[in-house]
Image: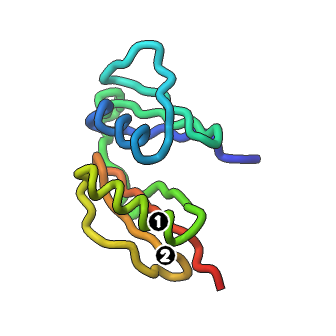
């Protein structure tokens, strides 16, 4: 069994969609772009759905403090290159890539979602 679908609740569909398309190679498959819902396909077939917070019928618009999504990259060079692309694209980054436990990477927050970019440290 493989996890292949995730729905994220966000405030700004167009900006969040652009982040995943520009920096993480997702492709939007919406027949008509809108500000309420967007379906993205990742390069490995993963399906990411972005849904506007107004769709939360019970009004819950926050994630737990430690909730995050992560991208495991092939090596430290790829982590550094992703950090540079994000930084040069104007994405707010509060930390540089660093050793964290047995990985090398960094975290940043975009539209209230913590995102981890990392790679396992090779012995």
Residue drawn at (28%, 58%) of the image: 87
What number is the disc on residue 48?
none
Counting from the top left corner in percent of width and height, residue 13 is at: 32, 32
Residue farthest right in this picture: 1
20 w.r.t. 29: above or below: below
What number is the disc on residue 79?
1
Query: Based on the displayed image, in which of its 4 quarters is residue 75 positioned?
Result: bottom right
Residue drawn at (50%, 32%) of the image: 27
Q: CA distance from mark 1 to mark 2?
A: 8 Å
Query: Based on the displayed image, in which of its 4 quarters is residue 10 positioned?
Result: top left
33 w.r.t. 21: above or below: above
- Tell me the colour scheme of the image: rainbow
Please report contact status of discs 1 and 2: CB closer than 8 Å, yes or no: yes
Query: Mark 1 or mark 2: which is in front?
Result: 1
Decide if residue 29 is on the left or right side of residue 18. Answer: right
Q: Which residue is mark 2?
A: 104
Decide if residue 76 is on the left or right side of residue 112. Answer: right
28 w.r.t. 75: above or below: above
Counting from the top left corner in percent of width and height, residue 38 is at: 42, 27
Counting from the top left corner in percent of width and height, residue 91 is at: 26, 53
In this view of the protein, which residue sits in the foreground, 53 or 16? 16
């Amino acid at each position: 069994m493989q996890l292949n679908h995730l729905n994220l609740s966000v405030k700004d569909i167009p900006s969040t969609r652009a982040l995943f398309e520009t920096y993480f190679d997702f492709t939007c498959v919406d027949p008509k772009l809108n500000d309420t819902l967007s379906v993205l396909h990742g390069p490995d077939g993963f399906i990411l759905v972005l849904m506007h917070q107004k769709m939360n019928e019970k009004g819950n618009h926050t994630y737990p403090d430690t909730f995050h999504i992560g991208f495991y990259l092939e090596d430290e060079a790829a982590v550094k290159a992703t950090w540079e692309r994000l930084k040069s694209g104007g994405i707010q980054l509060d930390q540089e890539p660093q050793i964290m436990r047995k990985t090398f990477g960094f975290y940043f927050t975009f539209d209230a979602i913590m995102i981890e970019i990392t790679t396992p440290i090779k012995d």
